[in-house]
Image (cartoon, grey):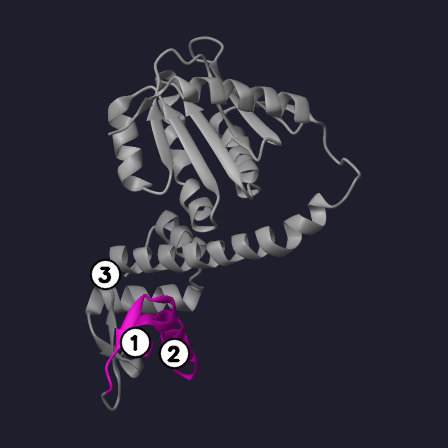
Amino acid sequence: MELSQKALNALQELGLTDYEVKAYVSLLGYGAQTAAEVSRQSGVPYSKVYDVLGRLEQKGWVESDAGRPSTYYPKPPNVALEAFKAQRESTYQAYERLIADELMPIYEKRDIKERPEVWILKGDVNIFGKLRETMSACRQEMVIALPGELRSFSSGAFDLIQPLLSRGVAVAILLSDEDAAESIKATLPKAEVRVRDGMFGGGVVCDAKQVVLLLGRSGEGTPHMAIWADHPGLAMFAKSYFDSLWASSKVLT
């Protein structure tokens, strides 16, 4: 059974070797098989087929029974993909904790500045990358303000909040859309969420030290823009502005 080059590349990017792809596709096409049958149908050498099937089972693409010989069954591709996603997310979270707990404190103790205090960011990819970096550095408090015109940033930013709440970071979120606020509160019950109209621009402030100011678009068809800074004065100014908005905001009931 032949795969398109695009599908083959996708499976390889998901971590499967050439032999693993051949074995899995053989199981998909012919159904449950013994190792010998997989070898014969797929062209994977018999001397390697048990190792190949074992790795596929470990990665969540196949399962086997306890027969003699064992029979191997392909998992549905969408189920296998979900297992791959869960494994990667678990690994990423472990790396994130390691970096936050051990490497970032070393970096933050350095007195030498290796980057400018103010960056101009253009485009969603660059802005989300800086948001992720800034938010992962939060240790005590993070505040977020997002008016309606910046709604496109909501899902990406809020996906980064749950790990902070799990670490005990206090999170306050200010939105201009009450329905969106109710939804976020239900998703993130440990966060404080309020509603306020009349916000101009939005942003994120972490520990009153770093700030990402979300400026929106400068014109039709232009990319989103933002300003990142770890300048203490600018971060404190942004935090004070947020506090003034927060004081006059609506508390969700």
Q: Amino acid at mark 3?
A: Pro
Q: Residue at x 54, y 21 (%)?
A: 240
**Comes first in the chain, label 3 or label 1:** 1
So how many labels did they put on this image? 3
Residue identifier under label 1: 38
Residue 216 rendering spot, x and y as whole percentages? 46, 16
Q: Which region of the structure is painted magenta?
A: 38-66
Residue 154 rendering spot, x and y as whole percentages? 37, 29
* Disc ID at residue 251: none
Magenta residue check for 32: no
**Comes first in the chain, label 3 or label 2:** 2
Magenta residue check for 54: yes
> Which image quadrant is residue 193 in?
top left
Q: Amino acid at mark 1?
A: Val
Q: CA distance from mark 3 to mark 1?
A: 17 Å
Q: For the residues carrying marks 3 and 2, which lies nearer the camera in this image?
A: 3
Residue identifier under label 2: 49
- Badge 1 crowding class, 10 Å Cα cut-off, few under 14, some 14 to 19, many 20 or more, is many
Residue identifier under label 3: 76
